[in-house]
Image (tube, rainbow, N blue to C red):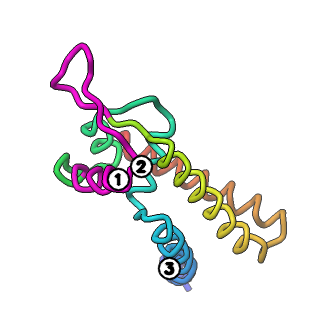
Amino acid sequence: MNEDQIKNVYIDRLFRVFQVSNRQIQQDMATTLKELKLTGPQFYILSLLSTTDSTKSTELAEQLDVKPSAITVMIDRLLKNKFVTRERDERDRRIVKLALTSEGKEAFEKAKTLRREIFTRYLSYLEEDDVDRFVSIYEKLAAAIEKDLTE
């Protein structure tokens, strides 16, 4: 086999294992989040809001790489479930900021705990050294992708 054929074999193997593992993890996460009245993107919004006192929806849209209209629908559902609040900026009433409520913080913490349980279950199939190498390789790949995106 030449070098390209060898690369293609690795790519095919990698694609197959990504399909199997990611599909199952995403299904487990979707089931878990559904019980908490959350979707994956809503969980991510709660995660972003958990790191700040308040954020504008346009900033969230940028971080999620979606249009402001798409973020509005997600925020409306979070508002309906009392996970976030909308607050007008006191200095500029045109600015509306979003913040987590106590219910939102609680839902986010429960989801984080359940996410850890899911990953703990699947990572338990591997030896500790394998987990360390696996995470290190993923971190290296993510860093390369982030660098490539900013260039």
> How many marks do you count on the picture?
3
Task: Please state the horizontal and vertical placement of residue 92, each as a whole percent of the image.
Answer: 20, 17
Query: Where are the magenta residues, as a range?
Result: 71-97
Q: CA distance from mark 3 to mark 1?
A: 25 Å
Q: Quadrant of residue 99?
A: top left
Magenta stretch: includes residue 20: no
State if disc 1 and disc 2 touch (CB < 8 Å). Answer: yes
Task: Please state the horizontal and vertical placement of residue 58, each as a whole percent of the image.
Answer: 24, 38
Q: Residue at x 54, y 83 (%)?
A: 20
Could you say which disc has been placed on residue 23 in the image? Answer: 3
- Residue corresponding to mark 2: 83
Amino acid type indicated by mark 1: Leu
Report helix, strand or loop for mark 2.
loop
Q: Residues within 10 Å of mark 3 (few under 14, many from 20)?
A: few
Q: Is residue 56 above or below residue 36?
A: above
- Residue corresponding to mark 1: 78
